[in-house]
C-alpha cells in the first residue's frame, strides 16, 4: 500500500469516523466530571501562585438594613514538592471596616490533609488568639458567605455528577459524602465551559428546597486569569443577601512566605496590602 | 478595567446528543432549565454594564484618623462602706492616628475622658490618671529585613493564658478590668523598646523598659480590698501606699521571648528580669507596699488538640529579695502552671476551660517565719476558668461568660457580657463583675463588695 493510499483509505476515514460521530468522552473532547471539578476548583481558588484583592462586602438583611465589610485578602499557595496539584494555602485577611474590626487580622493556614490552623490578631490588646474551629459552615464575618465558600471546599468531600451539558455550561450536581456534617443535601453548579468559572451555585437544604444561591455577576480578565470581581450570595430562607466586590486584584506578586506568620499579624505588610 | 473576554457561541448541539449521557430525573429537568443563569458582565459581550459609582476605598492613605466615642456607667450591687455606689461613670473619646514617614510608621492612640463621678486628678500619663490616657505613641521600623523595632508607648502581650498571666509580665490595669471598662483596658501601656529578630530557625523578641511600669493595681480608690495590716477591708479611707521604683535605667525591666512555629504548634521560651508587677511585699518599718525584685523563666506550647486548641504553660518566679523564703514581708518564689483547652462545640458556640496552679516554694520556711496571728496562706492555689461564647443574629449579638473559680480559696469571679452591634458604627454592651467568696481575704473574695453591673454605648468611626 502506498503512502497516499494509506492516507485515503485508512487514516482519513479513521479520523472522519471519530470526528463526525462522537461517541465517547475521550475522543469527542468532552471532559470527565472529575476533570471538570478539578479545573473549576483550580480556577476558583488557585489561580496564579499568589494573589491580593481588596474586598468590599455589603450585607443586606430582610428589612433592607445594610452592613458593610472592607478587607484586603492575601493568598499564597504552597507548592507541593511531589506534584504541582492544588494543595495547601495560606490566607491573610486584614480588616479595615467596620470600625470595631479595624486593623484586626485573620490568618489561615489551609491544609488539605488536616484541619486548618487559624489565628485572629486583636491590635488593641496586642493579642494573637488561636481560633479553634472544625465547623467550616459558619458565616464569614456575619455575611451570607460561609467560611468554606471563601477558603474553598475540598473536592473529595462530595460525589460529583454531570446533570447536563448545555452550549454554555457544565451543570454539575454535588452530593456530600458525609451528609451530617453539612446543612445542605446537595448543591448544583453551573460552570462556564470556556473559563471554568462557576457562574451560579444553588444549595438545596435537607428538604430539597433552595437555601442559598451564589451568582457571579461580573468577570474581568486580570493578567490573563478570568476573575469574578462581583458576586452575590442570597439566602432564600432569610431573605438576606451579601454582595461581594473585588478591587485592585493582582496575581503573582511574589508574596514572601513569612508574611503569613505572627510577625506580620503585629506588623501589617503595608506594601502588599495597598 | 481588564480586557473583555470574547468567545464564540458555535451553536453546536453535539454534546447533549452524545450517547451515554444520563437523563435528568423527573422534576429536576424542569428545575435546572428554569434556574440556568445569565452570563455575567465580562463573559457576555451583548450585556453592557451600567456606569458604576462604586470604587473600593483606597487602603494606604498616609494619615488615617479612626477611633470611637463611648459612654459607660456602672453601679455596685452591694453596699460597700468604703466606696461610692457608682462604680463607673465616664464618657471617653479615643482617637487613633497612623502616619507613614518613608519607612517609618508612627502611631498615636489617645483617650480623652470626662469622668464626672470621681475626683479629678492632674494628668499623670504613666498611671493613666487625669483626663488623658495616652494608650500608644510609638514608631515602628524595620532597618533590616529580619529586624523590627518598636519604640515608645505600646501595648504588649504574649503568653497563652486566657485572662491568666504566667509569662506575660507586661503591666495590667486591674482597676479597669474589675469595674467594667472594655476588655482592651486590661492591658496598660508600656514605655519601652521592643526589638524583634526573625529568622527561619527561631524568632527572638526583647523588650527593654527603662523605667519600671507596674500594674495599675488596686489601691482602694474605686475598689475596696483586703488590708492585711488592719485585718479588714479598706478602700477610700486607706489607700495602698507604695514605695515606687522609678529611677530611670536603674529600675529597669527586661523581657525576652524566643519562639517558633513547628507545623502549627507554637512553642515559646520566656525570661524576665525586673520586679513583681503588683505590690508583693511590705516595708515593715513604714508599712508601705513594695515591688520586690523578680526574675522569671518559663515556656509554653499551643496548638491543635483533639477537635480544638490546647495550651500548656509554666513559669518559675524567683523572688530575688527573698530567695530563701525567710522574709515574711516579701512574697516567696513560686511556680505557675497552666493547662487549657478550647473547642467550638456547635455552630457559633465556643467553650474554653483552663486549670491553673500556683504553688509557693519554700513553704515550710514561710510557715516557720510567719509572725504570730498572721493568716497562713495556702501552699497551692488552684484556679479553674470557664469561657462560654455564643454568637447570634448573624454574629451581631455576642453572649459570653468568663468565670474564675478557686476551689482552694473558695471564691469565684464571674464576668457575664452581652454585646450587640447595632449597625456599622453603633454598638451597645452590658455586663457584670460578680465577686463571691467564703472568706474576706482571698484573691477574689476580698472584692465581694465591689460586685457591679455596667452598660456602655459606643460609636466607632
Image (cartoon, coloured by chain):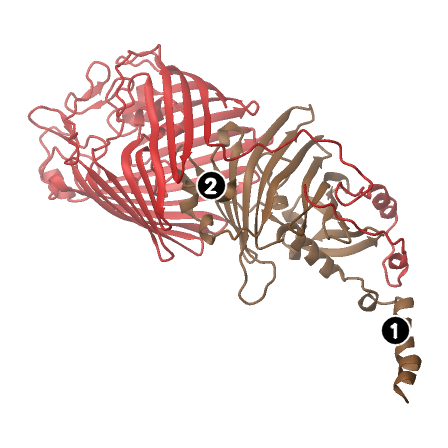
Left of B442 or right of it: where is B281? left
User: Where's the N terminus of chain B, which quadrant?
Assistant: top right
Q: How many marks?
A: 2
Residue drawn at point x = 36 percent, y = 16 percent: B113
- B115 to A249, vertically: above or below: above
Compare residues B399 and A57 and report the one nearer the observer.
Answer: A57
CB within 8 Å, label 2 to label 1: no
Residue drawn at point x = 51 percent, y = 47 percent: A108
Left of B332 or right of it: where is B156? right
Question: How far from the left and from the top, in percent, is residue B432?
Answer: 41, 23
Real-space CA distance between mark 2 and mark 1, rounded to the nearest whole angstrom: 58 Å
Q: Quadrant of residue B224?
A: top left
Q: Can residue B120 be seen from the camera position used here?
A: yes
- Of mark 2 and mark 1, the one earlier in the sequence is 1
Residue wearing tag 1: A15
Question: How far from the left and from the top, in percent, is residue A115?
Answer: 53, 52
Left of B345 or right of it: where is B296? left
Residue wearing tag 2: A270
Label 2 packing within 10 angstroms: few (<14), some (14-19), many (20+)? few
- A149 to B425, vertically: above or below: below
Residue drawn at point x = 84 percent, y = 67 percent: A24
- Rendering colour (chain B): red
- Rendering colour (chain A): brown
Residue drawn at point x = 52 percent, y = 29 percent: B398
Q: Can residue A21 be seen from the camera position used here?
A: no
Amino acid at each position: 500500500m502506498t503512502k497516499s493510499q494509506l492516507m485515503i483509505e485508512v487514516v482519513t476515514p479513521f479520523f472522519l469516523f471519530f470526528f463526525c460521530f462522537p461517541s465517547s468522552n475521550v475522543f469527542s473532547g468532552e471532559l470527565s466530571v472529575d476533570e471538570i471539578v478539578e479545573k473549576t476548583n483550580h480556577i476558583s481558588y488557585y489561580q496564579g501562585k499568589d494573589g491580593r484583592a481588596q474586598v468590599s462586602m455589603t450585607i443586606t438583611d430582610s428589612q433592607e438594613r445594610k452592613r458593610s465589610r472592607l478587607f484586603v485578602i492575601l493568598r499564597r499557595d504552597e507548592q507541593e514538592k511531589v506534584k504541582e496539584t492544588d494543595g495547601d494555602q495560606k490566607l491573610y485577611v486584614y480588616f479595615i471596616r467596620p470600625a470595631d474590626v479595624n486593623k484586626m487580622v485573620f490568618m489561615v493556614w489551609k491544609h488539605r490533609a488536616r484541619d486548618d490552623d487559624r489565628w485572629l490578631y486583636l491590635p488593641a490588646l496586642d493579642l494573637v488568639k488561636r481560633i479553634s474551629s472544625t465547623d467550616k459552615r459558619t458565616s464569614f464575618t456575619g455575611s451570607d458567605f460561609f467560611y468554606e465558600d471563601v477558603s474553598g471546599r475540598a473536592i473529595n468531600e462530595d460525589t460529583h455528577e454531570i446533570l447536563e451539558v448545555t452550549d454554555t455550561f457544565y451543570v454539575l450536581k454535588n452530593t456530600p459524602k458525609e451528609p451530617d456534617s453539612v446543612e445542605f443535601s446537595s448543591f448544583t453548579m453551573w460552570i462556564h465551559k470556556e473559563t471554568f468559572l462557576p457562574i451560579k451555585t444553588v444549595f438545596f437544604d435537607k428538604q430539597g428546597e433552595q437555601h442559598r444561591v451564589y451568582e457571579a455577576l461580573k468577570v474581568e480578565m486580570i493578567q490573563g486569569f478570568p476573575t469574578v470581581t462581583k458576586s452575590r450570595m442570597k439566602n432564600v430562607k432569610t431573605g438576606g443577601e451579601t454582595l461581594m466586590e473585588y478591587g485592585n486584584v493582582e496575581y503573582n506578586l511574589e508574596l514572601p512566605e513569612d508574611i503569613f506568620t505572627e510577625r506580620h499579624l503585629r506588623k501589617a505588610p503595608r506594601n502588599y496590602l495597598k | 478595567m481588564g480586557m473583555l473576554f470574547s468567545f464564540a457561541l458555535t451553536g453546536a448541539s453535539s454534546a447533549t446528543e452524545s450517547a451515554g449521557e444520563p437523563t435528568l430525573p423527573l422534576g429536576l429537568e424542569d428545575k435546572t432549565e428554569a434556574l440556568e443563569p445569565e452570563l455575567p458582565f465580562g463573559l457576555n459581550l451583548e450585556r453592557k454594564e451600567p456606569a458604576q459609582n462604586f470604587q473600593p476605598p483606597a487602603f494606604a492613605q498616609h494619615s488615617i484618623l479612626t477611633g470611637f466615642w463611648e459612654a459607660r456607667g456602672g453601679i455596685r450591687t452591694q453596699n460597700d462602706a468604703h466606696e461610692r455606689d457608682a462604680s463607673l461613670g465616664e464618657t471617653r473619646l479615643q482617637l487613633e492616628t497612623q502616619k507613614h514617614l518613608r519607612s517609618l510608621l508612627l502611631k498615636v492612640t489617645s483617650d480623652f475622658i470626662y469622668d464626672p463621678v470621681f475626683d479629678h486628678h492632674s494628668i499623670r500619663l504613666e498611671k493613666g490618671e487625669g483626663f488623658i490616657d495616652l494608650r500608644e505613641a510609638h514608631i515602628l521600623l524595620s532597618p533590616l529585613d529580619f529586624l523590627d523595632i518598636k519604640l515608645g508607648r505600646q501595648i504588649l502581650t504574649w503568653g497563652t493564658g486566657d485572662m491568666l498571666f504566667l509569662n506575660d509580665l507586661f503591666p495590667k490595669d486591674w482597676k479597669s478590668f474589675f469595674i467594667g471598662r472594655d476588655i482592651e483596658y486590661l492591658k496598660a501601656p508600656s514605655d519601652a523598646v521592643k526589638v524583634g529578630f526573625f529568622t527561619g530557625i527561631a524568632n527572638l523578641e526583647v523588650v527593654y523598659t527603662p523605667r519600671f511600669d507596674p500594674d495599675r493595681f488596686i489601691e482602694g480608690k474605686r475598689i475596696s480590698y483586703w488590708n492585711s495590716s488592719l485585718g479588714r477591708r479598706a478602700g477610700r479611707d486607706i489607700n495602698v501606699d507604695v514605695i515606687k521604683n522609678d529611677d530611670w535605667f536603674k529600675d529597669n525591666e527586661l523581657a525576652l521571648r524566643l519562639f517558633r512555629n513547628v507545623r502549627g504548634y507554637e512553642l515559646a521560651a520566656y525570661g524576665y528580669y525586673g520586679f513583681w508587677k503588683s505590690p508583693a511585699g511590705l516595708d515593715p518599718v513604714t508599712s508601705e507596699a513594695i515591688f520586690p525584685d523578680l526574675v522569671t523563666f518559663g515556656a509554653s506550647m499551643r496548638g491543635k488538640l483533639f477537635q480544638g486548641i490546647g495550651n500548656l504553660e509554666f513559669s518559675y518566679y524567683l523572688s530575688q529579695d527573698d530567695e530563701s523564703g525567710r522574709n515574711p514581708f516579701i512574697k516567696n518564689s513560686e511556680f505557675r502552671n497552666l493547662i487549657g483547652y478550647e473547642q467550638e462545640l456547635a455552630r457559633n458556640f465556643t467553650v474554653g476551660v483552663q486549670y491553673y496552679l500556683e504553688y509557693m516554694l519554700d513553704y515550710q520556711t514561710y510557715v516557720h517565719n510567719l509572725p504570730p496571728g498572721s493568716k497562713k496562706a495556702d501552699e497551692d492555689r488552684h484556679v479553674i476558668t470557664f469561657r462560654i461564647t455564643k454568637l447570634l443574629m448573624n454574629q451581631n449579638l455576642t453572649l459570653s461568660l468568663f468565670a474564675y473559680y478557686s476551689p482552694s480559696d473558695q471564691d469565684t469571679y464571674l464576668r457575664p457580657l452581652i454585646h450587640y452591634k447595632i449597625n456599622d458604627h453603633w454598638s451597645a454592651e452590658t455586663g457584670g463583675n460578680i465577686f463571691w467568696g467564703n472568706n474576706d481575704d482571698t484573691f477574689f473574695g476580698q472584692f465581694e463588695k465591689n460586685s457591679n453591673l455596667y452598660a456602655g454605648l459606643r460609636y466607632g468611626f
